[in-house]
DNA sequence: GTGAAAGCGCTAACAG
DNA sequence: CTGTTAGCGCTTTCAC
């Protein structure tokens, strides 16, 4: 040690008081030469804070969620917080256990509003700072008390539906993923934006490219005169589009195809996929900003942020 | 409290000794009713272990790395370890700071062998258990002392080159990403597998779909009779393929296109992309298994694992 | 402006 | 088999 007590060093590091130039210099020098670093575990025990936040998503493999992680990670890093990521893979059980273990290690949690009800309830009960992200209508979520960054699925679907209607599509099939709490709003928005269209719904078990691929034939040929297929998300749409081409179906000539999320690869499909940007990265950023504010100050200015979905029109829904 | 000392509870929880049925029952009951959970920070301070591991990748947005995270996350979770993810975004500075902060919070680190040299050196010097993943030739890495899960880029490229040669391609362009330490081996393997081909190299600044897209025209028209383009990775290949189609170039009729990594979307491109599977998920799994072994036992059976790349032939390199 | 003492919740070493 | 005694490395009163 070079001259002072541990207390003083602690205060300096945590910017708590002011110091004589001389002492400060001496301490900094010592820190430098000893390459001293705080021990986070000890600090945590003393303060009760970990400077780590948790992020729970339902599927690491979906670029939409990767985008959210990216955004959140950026902000956390800038503010000196670590990030623990958990993928609960749509499993009820999983989610609760993972979340409660996670909660012990972090100062706050960002989680998908699509977590199982029970997990959300538990999260709220835990009294840890927590922010939800994802698609919800104001007041719709049972655990509405949790702060959230939301983006309206209804609105997103409405924009898309209107675009399809204007391009002269009337026989629409919606590839639904009913396991998701976000699914219903998308269908709802679609219906209201296309009052003159006939909308058929096919329910999918999975939200993957493979699911879109294997449902393709029956989706395309299953309804007479089907001229548009809207998918629950871009993953499904990518699989569907691919298989449609393989079947020799013309897109958009015969059928228009669209999804949600604006996953980066959609732009590179042939034809490029029309989609609705759900602001993946921004959701992550805003959620993290809100959470950190909550952690630091105990309160947040706004406890609900709403982002606006943006329709991204590409060739897959062009006029025929 | 219900009857015993803290020590006893600690021992029970950590399965250190055996107990009378009666005491065990009483403790379990108390734990249940109090909903008691260990405080990880306190535990960490006492033991010096955090039960968290760190994972550093260079680009969260590339599904190849997402796959690695996925694999690692799976294994960590199964063994009760948390995972902190860090994306150093190819930035030298970033990597060192992030890594040293990370090191304080975790019991061990899995990192890309493509980290900047300085960061690798620091990692090795830190004496934390660490495992590298990625492409390296045996003994090639300067910091070869670090345990690693490797997959031979040379081999991967060799397989691909041989396939191209057999499909009658002779004028090959390699879209190189020289910033990556993995780049050179790929070119090398390509050259040796295609001794009769003329290989032109174009160096890229980025390893993104956009980079592939914007280089497309000059890559395709820049070399007389170019009949195949191999990309440093699938991201570049996806962008290139897309733009090639947009330019009206026939793939594979006029030009064959291929990449590396076997990113999930490659199968869904039109035409589907030929690529080499670099075992993303398995890399993550194996690396985590190795690391956890290292953490728990201090030693590992094998300190170097080698995975075998698999050539995935798809339509983008079909015969013309 | 600086330091001494106490304690955060746990585990480890040693008794009994 | 169970309890006692000491810390782990930091922050936090509260004096000086």
Image (spheres, coloured by chain):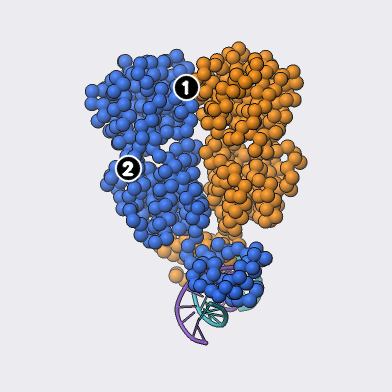
Chain colours: A blue, B orange, C cyan, D purple
Provide the residue designation for mark 1.
Answer: A270
Chain at numbered mark 1: A
Whether labels 1 and 2 belong to a single chain: the reply is: yes
Cβ atoms under marks 1 and 2 closer than 8 Å? no
Closer to the camera, B95 or B159?
B95
Residue A165 location, quadrant: top left
Q: Is residue A16 left or right of residue A121?
A: right
Q: Residue at x 75, y 25 (%)?
A: B192
Could you say where residue A218 lies in the image, as x and y percent from the top left?
39, 20
Residue B309 location, quadrant: top right
Residue A71's place in the image compared with A300, above or below, is above
Sequence-wise first label, 1 or 2 = 2
Residue B191 visible in image: yes
Q: Is residue B138 left or right of residue A165?
A: right
Secondary structure of the residue carrying numbered label 1? loop
Residue B280's place in the image compared with B5, above or below, is above
Q: Residue at x 41, y 22 (%)?
A: A315
Secondary structure of the residue carrying numbered label 2? loop
Q: Residues within 10 Å of mark 2 (few under 14, many from 20)?
A: many
Residue B10 visible in image: no
Q: Residue furthest top?
A: B320
Quadrant of the snapshot with the N terminus of chain A? bottom right
Q: Residue at x 64, y 45 (%)?
A: B115
Closer to the camera, A312 or A26?
A26
Residue B64 location, quadrant: top right
Chain at numbered mark 2: A
Provide the residue designation for mark 2.
Answer: A136
Q: Residue at x 45, y 34 (%)?
A: A263
* Distance between the alpha carbons at the discs numbered 1 and 2: 32 Å
């Amino acid at each position: 040690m070079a001259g002072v007590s541990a207390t003083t060093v602690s205060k300096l590091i945590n910017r708590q008081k002011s110091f004589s130039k001389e002492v400060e210099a001496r301490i900094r020098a010592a820190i430098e030469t000893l390459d001293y670093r705080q021990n986070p575990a000890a600090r945590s025990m003393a303060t009760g804070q970990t400077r780590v936040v948790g992020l729970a998503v339902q599927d690491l493999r979906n670029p939409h969620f990767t985008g959210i992680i990216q955004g959140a990670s950026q902000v956390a890093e800038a503010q000196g917080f670590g990030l623990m990521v958990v993928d609960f893979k749509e499993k009820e059980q999983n989610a609760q256990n993972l979340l409660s273990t996670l909660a012990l290690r972090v100062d706050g949690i960002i989680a998908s509003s699509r977590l199982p009800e029970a997990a959300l309830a538990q999260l709220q009960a835990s009294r840890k700072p927590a922010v939800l992200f994802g698609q919800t209508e104001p007041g719709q979520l049972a655990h509405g008390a949790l702060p959230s960054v939301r983006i309206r699925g209804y609105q997103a679907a409405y924009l898309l539906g209107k675009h399809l209607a204007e391009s002269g599509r009337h026989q629409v099939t919606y590839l639904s993923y009913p396991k998701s709490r976000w699914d219903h709003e998308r269908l709802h928005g679609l219906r209201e934006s296309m009052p003159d269209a006939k909308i058929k719904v096919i329910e999918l078990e999975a939200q993957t490219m493979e699911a879109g691929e294997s449902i393709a034939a029956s989706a395309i040929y299953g309804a007479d005169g089907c001229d548009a297929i809207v998918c629950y998300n871009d993953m499904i749409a990518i699989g569907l589009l691919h298989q449609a081409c393989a079947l020799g179906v013309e897109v958009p000539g015969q059928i228009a195809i669209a999804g949600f999320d604006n996953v980066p690869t959609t732009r590179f499909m042939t034809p490029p996929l029309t989609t609705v940007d759900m602001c993946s990265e921004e959701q992550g950023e805003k959620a993290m900003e809100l959470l950190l504010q909550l952690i630091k100050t105990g309160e947040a200015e706004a406890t609900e942020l709403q982002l606006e979905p943006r329709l991204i029109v590409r060739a897959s829904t062009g006029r025929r």
